[in-house]
Image (tube, helix red, strand yellow):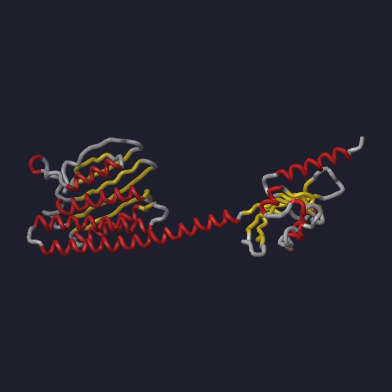
Amino acid sequence: MSKEPIAHFEAASTLAVVVSSNEPLLFLSADQKVIAASTSFCRTFEIDPATIPGRALSELGNGEWAMPKLASLLKATASGSARIEAYEIDLKRSERKTRQLIVNAQVLDDGNKDHTRLLVAITDVTDARAEAKQKDDLVREKAILIQEVQHRVANSLQIIASVLMQSARRVQSEEARGHLHDAHNRVMSIAAVQKQLSTSSGGIVELRSYFTQLCESLGASMIADGDRLSIAVTVDDSSVEADVSISLGLIVTELVINALKHAFAQQETGRIVIDYRSDRTDWTLTVTDNGVGMPAGSDAPKAGLGTGIVEALARNLRGEINLSDANPGTAVRISHRGDADRRTRIPAAA
């Protein structure tokens, strides 16, 4: 039985599929004459469907499809020596916007073994590329804007800190001077946070350098004699998200301020150590001094602003606060264990 009717049926089926396709498709002969074009192709590239069958690809439209490189690749594909995959071309048309296209082509077996046929799929990516470029431009503009804001914030914080120090020098009240110094130190802490965030990548902060920078800032503003008092940082390779780093940094600031103000009044020398360790979702932050220790009973100081700040921040981090005797000195430990939601209070702080 002859196979000719089957071949004819398969060819007709292929033509029907090509013409009805929602994607821009061309069905070409080996010599690159158009056998059929999808309605989508004609609509996308504004070509009259009646003018297409039997014409060479290079003759479509106003000749804009006459591209030597594309013709060479199609010829190689028809011979079986190459295959067009994601080939990018620019379709240039007079008085119209240049379109960016991606072309894929392959030999198609339509049932007729005596003739080579090519199926060419064309995707217009002009709008997608323009949208992607617009997004990239917006990201760059946003980065520049953020950098400018960070610069202005840093300058503003330095001005505020300077004004606080000048005010502290002018006031007569020791209590008022102490409050102004505390405010200055807290502003410097925020400035250190801001500086670290401005250099962090993807909103992730590496804690060792952050705590080191923070403690250097606190030491410079509060320690007059570096041979008498010192601050050390022992932190592992932990990195945390920006919002967590802010809370941890403020906790360290308050505990260091508290230790510098109260732990070493009766000592010639002293040392404060900030230690941080983590294991997956578990972490522990410890601030230890080798000072006089925490007074007990009626001698214990009343909880102040620093205590409230530390408790609020620890609660926000779902951390447990523990105060212990470091023998000598005091150790304040904030620890987090998975989803633990345990709370304790620091007996007293500045």
Q: Residue at x 19, y 45 (%)?
A: 307
Relative to residue 41, is residue 283 drawn left or right?
left
Relative to residue 82, is residue 3 drawn left or right?
right
Relative to residue 244, is residue 36 drawn left or right?
right
Between 285 and 214, the one nearer to me in the picture: 214
Q: Residue at x 38, y 61 (%)?
A: 147
Q: Point out residue 4 in the picture as x, y percentages from the top left corner.
A: 89, 40
Identify the image quadrant of residue 72. bottom right
Q: Residue at x 16, y 49 (%)?
A: 350
Between 291 and 105, the one nearer to me in the picture: 105
Residue 137 visible in the current orientation: yes
Residue 106 visible in the current orientation: no
Between 276 and 1, the one nearer to me in the picture: 1
Q: Quadrant of the N terminus?
A: top right
Q: Point out residue 84 in the picture as x, y percentages from the top left corner.
A: 71, 54
Identify the image quadrant of residue 311. top left
Q: Residue at x 79, y 57 (%)?
A: 56
Identify the image quadrant of residue 100. bottom right
Residue 158 vertical placement versus 119 (above, below): below
